[in-house]
Amino acid sequence: MSPRQTASVPHSASFRPAASLAGGARGVEIYTRISLYLFVPMEGFFYLYAASALAHSRDPLPSALALGLLAVVALVHIGLAFATVHVGFDQPLVRDRLHPVVLALLAVTAVVVGLSLVVLPGVAETGSWDARSLMIGACGAATFGALAIGFPFRRLAIAGTVVPVMILAGRLLDGALDVGAVVVAVFLYVATMFWTSTVRISMWVLEVVRELEASREMVGRLAVAEERLRISRDMHDVVGRALSAVAVKSDLSAALARRGDPRAAEEMDEVRTLAQESLREVRGVVAGYRATDLATELAGARSVLRAAGIAVRVIGVVPPLATTQQDALAWVVREAVTNVVRHSKAAECRLELDDDGDTTVLRIVNDGVVGAEPGAVRRGEPAGTGLAGLRERLAAVGGTLDVSTHGDRFTLVARVPTQPGAAA
């Protein structure tokens, strides 16, 4: 794909799934997702501390029905926290209004806190770590941690004060508000903010990577726009000057012809010469614009394959090749990627460059061959003129082209002799 074509690829700004990101950005996205997905179930682990605190309560244990109801609601809360994290990766949690999953999470959080205040005892037999405080603290930390996916930390830090307030309010209702209760409330607030800040920092890193990826794409589009302006200026200069000269010479030859002056033929010969020279200049400008570059074509291939939803890997670096060899391989990349997008149902595509010193090998492998029979192995060139044209281009620089199909996997291998030149 040429630089002009890359500018037409749609660009999404903030929330982009991992498959649409390139290289390291995609890796950061996947790593952050997995880390936070594993982080959410830790809420259930901290509920076990609340359960163990029940054994040291001064009050009688709640009924099995009440504890079962609280356990079910707590499990629902864990599921909604996971759903909030999942949704927050790919879309805003608030636009004109809160996302439904956020509303559901807040509602279930209120139910968990309410049941904890009613069902669980608020004073421990020894020490100050009572089941109620631990339950409210774990639920609050998980809620604000999930909301940190899409909300700024400052707002969550202010809203998070509801956790110690509810703990102290419960102690006050039990008539057991003391220094120990304040220490527990402050500690659980700090733990809540630690959980929240961990998630927020992870998302901040991901947002920075997303912005860097968007900036890189913007630089590419600006480069394409600048090149278009350069070409338009060159074309304006060449064509405008040529047409002006042709118009003047044509008027002169017409005037001479009306008078029967034999110099009219000479002037028309000069018009023809001007037209031919101008045509050569235009072709030179266009040829310079269309000159293919292997590194640019690989970057364009990566962009267009990802835009088509195809996972792509580019392995190896562009070796120093003569312009003719690099041009031939660039056309191979362009034609092969076009065929992958148009004529296959590929889910992945791999482009490999290898140089052993004498030969540079470009290997392009993709799955999703339409109409392939399982276990079938076919060699040779499928019907069509695209690969035949590539074979001719490679033959002109001493190269070869081989294609084969194994099952639904198609492999194209282009080889050119390594002749170091000015291209890098």
Image: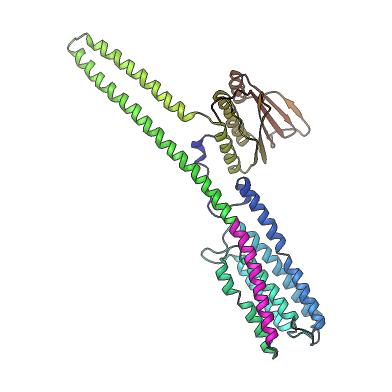
Image quadrant where residue 50 sits: bottom right
Relative to residue 394, is residue 214 depicted above or below? below
Instruction: Give the residue at x 40% y 37%.
Output: 229
Lateral position of residue 283 relative to residue 41, left or right: left
The range drawn in magenta is 178-205
Lateral position of residue 264 relative to residue 274, left or right: left
Image quadrant where residue 412 sits: top right
Along the viewing direction, whichever of 339 and 172 lies nearer the viewer: 172
* Image position, residue 214 (x, y; %): 53, 49
Which SS type dominates the magenta stretch? helix
Q: Quadrant of the N terminus?
A: top right
On the question of residue 130 being in view, the answer is yes
Q: Can you name the residue that lies furthest to the left here?
A: 259
Q: Is residue 190 magenta?
A: yes
Relative to residue 211, is residue 275 depicted above or below? above
Lateral position of residue 210 relative to residue 61, left or right: left
Q: Is residue 126 magenta?
A: no
* Image position, residue 82 (x, y; %): 68, 63
Relative to residue 271, is residue 372 depicted above or below? below
Instruction: Give the residue at x 62% y 45%.
Output: 23
On the question of residue 346 being in view, the answer is no
